[in-house]
Amino acid sequence: DDVPIDQFRRECREFAAYWIEVQKRDFKRLGVVGDWKNPYTTMAYSAEAQIVREIGKFLVNGGLYRGSKPVLWSVVEQTALAEAEVEYYDHRSTTVWVRFPVVRAGRPALAGAAALIWTTTPWTLPGNRAVAFSPELDYAVLRVERATEGRRARPGETLLVAAALAEEVVKRAGIEAYSVIDTFPGESLAGTIASHPLRGQGYDFEVPLFAAGFVEADQGTGLVHIAPGHGADDFELSQANALPVPDTVGPDGVYLPQVPLFAGRSVYRPDGKPGDANEAVLAAIDAAGGLLARGTLVHSYPHSWRSKAPLIFRNTPQWFISMETNGLRQKALRAIAETRWIPPQGRNRIEAMVESKPEWCVSRQRAWGVPIAVFTHRETGEPLRDAAVVERIAALVERAGADVWFSADPAQLLGNAYDPAEWEKVTDIVEVWFDSGSTHAFVLEQRPELEWPASLYLEGSDQHRGWFQSSLIEACGTRGRAPYQAVLTHGFMLDEEGRKMSKSLGNVIAPQEIMQQSGADVLRLWVVGSDYTEDVRIGPEILKHHSDVYRRLRNTLRYLLGALDGFSVAEAVEIEAMPELERWVLHRLAELDQLVRRSVEAFDFHGMFSALHNFCAVDLSAFYFDIRKDRLYCDAPDDVRRRAVRTVLDRCFDCLARWLAPVICFTAEEAWLARHGDMPERSIHLERFPDVPDEWRDEPLGERWQTLRDLRRVVTGALELERAAKRLGSSLQAAVELFVPERLIDLLRGIDLAELCITSAGTVRSRPVPRDAFTLPDVAEIGTRVSAAPGERCERCWRVLPEVGQVPGHDDLCRRCADVVDPISAAAGVGAG
């Protein structure tokens, strides 16, 4: 308060500008794409001007009004807070059971009785003006027969409580014996009048009992004390029954001078610690004979998201946007139904919030932010609802910033149509959630490259109460529909044990640390590898797993780059000339293309990533690459089968680089530039997903090779046993016999079993599986026997074949390798000559 407002606002702007640059740097390092040279900020003059226009639209259409209602108030910051600025933490409250003597009732048993209320906020009792009961509950009048010595219960007194809570009440009050002298339905309490426990000390008013739907029998006494200035339900009930709303607590959390007995006592101190109000109120009520019992309760309680201090409900003049004027609530509910929510349960969450949303309090008692640029009449207090004045103010803000509201002469803002002497400026600030809720107006509608409404809003699940909701209400109030077509929400980050991250637990993991240790792509892999619809866990072991996944993906791309060295379009082979295995890989690419596109449309990034990773790790590395290494390394460069392999590898690289680019953006870019040249126009992020030809899709072929892979699993299982027993080194030292049922013989026609299983020889036999053959439980009708392959090892391809040593001029090569080597040797000899 000691700093001039212009200096304070200037320092706030500088502080915000610094952190915008820090965030911009970190976002770039994360690989986030954005218009970083021209970002949108709510403190830009053009944005401030549009926010003035947006609040002005509510002003002109009658939706904005000034009223006095209980709002959540921070004593530390001395301002009202919106729902989205409130966090809930465990808090230890003093609980009290207080007698309200019945002075007039329709049932004889209530004569001389006391209506017993229970509350966790004793400091609100000076603001009490009524007691609420439930018409759905049964109530009982209890007579105390015997009480524990030293307790406040008095033998002979009668107490009114909900019948379902009687046992709990007598236990808490130390009542050892009691009798029930009357029971009746709650609706019978209508018309009952009580008095305040401090009657005769400045609280000499009637305290009527009213029916209320919010009274329940889960705890307390079934009777709720009503302080109209200190609770939303209390306020609504008082308004419905024409009760006054007293002002008892000031903005500093101190009882106002007009409060009998307690003026000057504080509910909370400026540092957020409890003041002396609770004990002062309890001492006075106890002295007056009103206190029956007291205790403590640890429960979830609202705190400020900034100061972390407990909040109070306080009746205060504020500016509100009506949820009923202009049918705003119904427009918002209709817009929710028309929006796509990912995951779908997000709709239920925000729908319930909007259905019960109170009037939107949009004013704050702060110095930094966009002002509520409204004039009120000095005599009537009515706001000036003039669109021309709103636009005049907005135009000035667009040129000079929102500070102009505080510095400009009112005559300049009002224009010639109004006398400045009759009008005064509102000094409140627009709450930040209205600022953020207006982003669609100063981003989407003012940038030609963007469209309104947005395709997608994306944030954490807490934003159903925050940005998603404020944007929805703002746009529905000014444009009649939501500013987005779809909304995606994700969970919160937890540590590996599922605990919330906190400095006190020492389990906070900063993204910057992860990027420094492992790189941004590992962090991005963790994001896409997590199920964002739930809270997501992160920690050293989880990151280690994703580092391993990253290495597998990177190694796949590296292998493809190495295998494609020197490849050109002229080498490519048409699909008709390809062997079956190559056509199967193309079929898998076609399947993945459809899956990737479906996944992106459904925002199922986790499913998409799992499929791509499995394709790289299982289909390619553990199967196709393994089988085709022989063709790639040993066949002649111009052999059509080797060219087919390289053609398929080229298609694999092209598809994978594009599909993986949104996930491991830095690695995909590195691989793409290594393949196509490091030039600006070559970026993978300027490419679209590949256009996969329909002819690649071949369902019968896919089913055939799924069965062949099952057959191969039996062979590889047997080979692993032989290796483990030290009877075999490389699988190329083996010959295999495969025993299959007759129905599978046709499936194996044209298949080189040795090539499929990476052995030197293979024989298929249609007969029952011998007892000594190896089998797998899930394919027990297939068996295999492994033996040493006959012949000698080819020193070039390492296959063991009888023909090695029989090829003229090549004592250590097989016939295939000799045929490849001879032309190369001849060419080398010619060149040397």
Image (cartoon, rainbow, N blue to C red):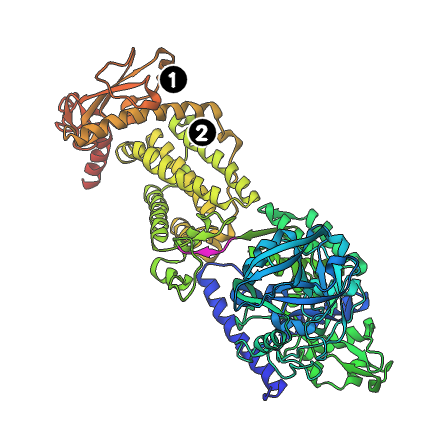
Q: Which residue is mark 2?
A: 575
686 with respect to 775 (left or right): right
Magenta span contains residue 502:
no
Out of 530 and 727, give the one closest to the viewer: 530
Q: Secondary structure at mark 1?
A: helix
| Cα gap from disc 1 to disc 2, whole angstroms | 21 Å
Q: Is residue 39 visible?
A: no
Task: Give the amino acid at mark 1.
Answer: Leu
Residue range corresponding to the magenta coloring: 491-495
Q: Which residue is mark 1?
A: 747
Asked if residue 310 is positioned above or below residue 829 in the image, the reply reads: below
Asked if residue 808 is positioned above or below residue 371 in the image, the reply reads: above
Quarter of the image where the N terminus is located: bottom right
Q: Position of residue 403 (x, y in %)?
A: 67, 81
Out of 826 and 573, give the one closest to the viewer: 573
Specify few, some or many for label 2: CA neighbours under 10 Å numbering under 14, 14-19, or 20 or more: some
Q: Secondary structure at mark 2?
A: helix
Residue at 35% from the left image edge and 29% from the top image edge: 641
Q: Which sits earlier in the primary sequence, circle 1 or circle 2?
A: 2
In which quarter of the view is residue 385 placed? bottom right
821 with respect to 40 (left or right): left
263 with respect to 727 (left or right): right
Q: Position of residue 7 (x, y in %)?
A: 59, 86
The label nearer to you, 1 versus 2, is 1
Out of 268 and 822, give the one closest to the viewer: 268
Quarter of the image where the C terminus is located: top left
Q: Position of residue 345 (x, y in %)?
A: 60, 46
Task: Give the amino acid at mark 2.
Answer: Ile
Residue at 65% from the left image edge and 57% from the top image edge: 142
Residue that lies at the very extreme toward the right in this rendered image:
417
Q: Position of residue 444 (x, y in %)?
A: 66, 60
